[in-house]
Image (tube, rainbow, N blue to C red):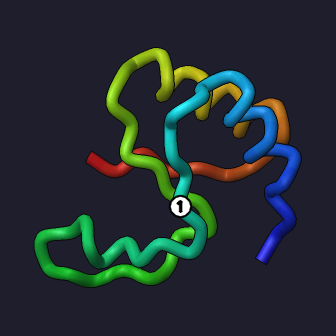
Amino acid sequence: MNDYSQFLDQFKTLSPGEEILLNESSAKYTAWRVGGPADLFSEVKSETVLNTLVRLAREMNIPFFILG
């Protein structure tokens, strides 16, 4: 697993109160209950939080996938 500490620190500063889960099983979020662990997982509640996550991931060259 990668060290995402800088990403997590910046996200917490920019989006206090929002949560990012580590090694979260993606099977919990699919109809067929299949999928392995996601290094980082967030169930965003606003467009602002989504924009923050995508911007930080791009700036730090962290690959991401939007499920939904």
Q: Which quarter of the picture shows residue 53?
A: top right
Residue 60 is situated, as x and y percent measured from the top left of the image, at: 84, 40
Instruction: Tell which of 12 and 50 is nearer to you.
Output: 12
At horizontal 82% and vertical 31% (from top left) the residue drawn is: 59
Furthest residue toward left: 31
Instruction: Tell which of 59 and 13 is nearer to you.
Output: 13
Q: Residues within 10 Å of mark 1 (few under 14, many from 20)?
A: few
Q: Which quarter of the picture shows residue 15?
A: top right
| Above-or-below relation of 43 to 40 | above
Instruction: Tell which of 4 and 15 is nearer to you.
Output: 15
Residue 1 is situated, as x and y percent measured from the top left of the image, at: 77, 77
| Above-or-below relation of 12 to 4 | above
Give, as a three-letter code, the residue at label 1: Leu
At horizontal 45% and vertical 83% (from top left) the residue drawn is: 36
Residue 3 is situated, as x and y percent measured from the top left of the image, at: 86, 65
Furthest residue toward front: 17
Taking the image as shown, residue 66 lies to the left or right of residue 6, namely left
Q: Which quarter of the picture shows residue 51?
A: top right
At horizontal 14% and vertical 79% (from top left) the residue drawn is: 32
At horizontal 59% and vertical 67% (from top left) the residue drawn is: 22
| Above-or-below relation of 59 to 63 | above
Callout 1 secondary element: strand
Taking the image as shown, residue 65 lies to the left or right of residue 46, namely right
Residue annotated with mark 1:
21
Residue 39 is situated, as x and y percent measured from the top left of the image, at: 62, 68
| Count of all numbered marks drawn on residues in the image | 1
Instruction: Tell which of 10 and 66 is nearer to you.
Output: 10
